[in-house]
Image: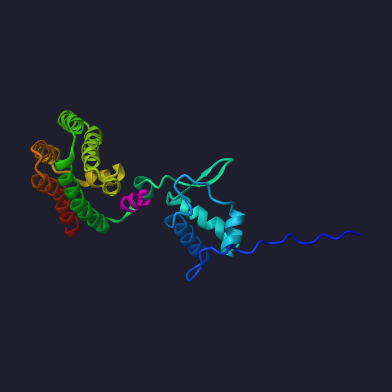
Amino acid sequence: MATTTPEAVPEPEADAVPLKGGSVTQRAIESIKAMITDGNLAPGQRLPTERDLAVRLGISRSSMREAIRALTVLGVLESRHGSGIYVTNLEAGDLLDTFGVVAEISPQPRLVEFLEVRRILESAATALAAARITEPQLAAVAVHLDSMREAEDPEEFLAADMAFHRTITQAAGNEALAAIVEGLSSRTFRARVRRGHQEADAFARAREEHARIYQALVGRDPEAARVAAASHVGAVEDWLRGQLEE
């Protein structure tokens, strides 16, 4: 009677990234990240199969599956149905999505801290934009400013507000900075602040603050743009701090 021999399991490859410290899944995550940063896996490239990776790193397939799932959530990997797992294009916006989620769901005391971060970064982005913004981008900023002036519904105002700031941060010419500011300025994040901001003249003052930012951009004045943006975000930050102290 014929007997079958177990399938031979290949030895891990000589260039496998060593797994040291932490949980097995975390070590697998670090190893895949190292393969990307070392250039062994390029953006858009298909990963080896789950089984091959597990063998290469000397871990179980279940741990490798968890590592791939975690990196997919983080935007580093993506699953293409019927094709396999691929490295994403590693765009800053995709990789920083989770940062925006943290900002959105944080309790109010932490919300103030995120507003402080936004004030620092958005003022820097606005200063860069003052030096780099193109005429078409400046025209788009003017359109969003007009929309804010004409908006009567808070939702319309908020949409124009977000488009105004998004155009400016994109004009700064720094994708990573724009992605971080976008995460701090998401619709949910702003709406949480706006809902509590019940001062009668809040929208009127916001329009004035946006107009000052726009004028600084028109004047190509980075320092004036920085101050105007910092003052705009700082007004909301100060208001929220006051609410927490009451």
- Against 131, residue 54 (above or below) is below
Rendered location of residue 4, percent (x, y): 82, 59
Q: Residue at x 24, y 32 (%)?
A: 156
Does 102 lie within the magenta span?
yes
Q: Residue at x 34, y 45 (%)?
A: 93
Magenta segment: 96-104
Q: Residue at x 57, y 57 (%)?
A: 53
Q: Residue furthest front?
A: 14
Q: From the viewer's side, name the closer residue of 181 and 83.
A: 83
Q: From the viewer's side, name the closer residue of 163 and 148.
A: 163
Q: Residue at x 9, y 43 (%)?
A: 221
Does 15 lie within the magenta span?
no
Rendered location of residue 216, percent (x, y): 9, 40
- Against 162, residue 36 (above or below) is below
Q: Residue furthest bottom?
A: 21
**Quarter that holds the N terminus:** bottom right
- Chief secondary structure of the magenta span? helix
Rendered location of residue 33, percent (x, y): 45, 57
Q: From the viewer's side, name the closer residue of 220 and 242.
A: 220
**Quarter that holds the C terminus:** bottom left
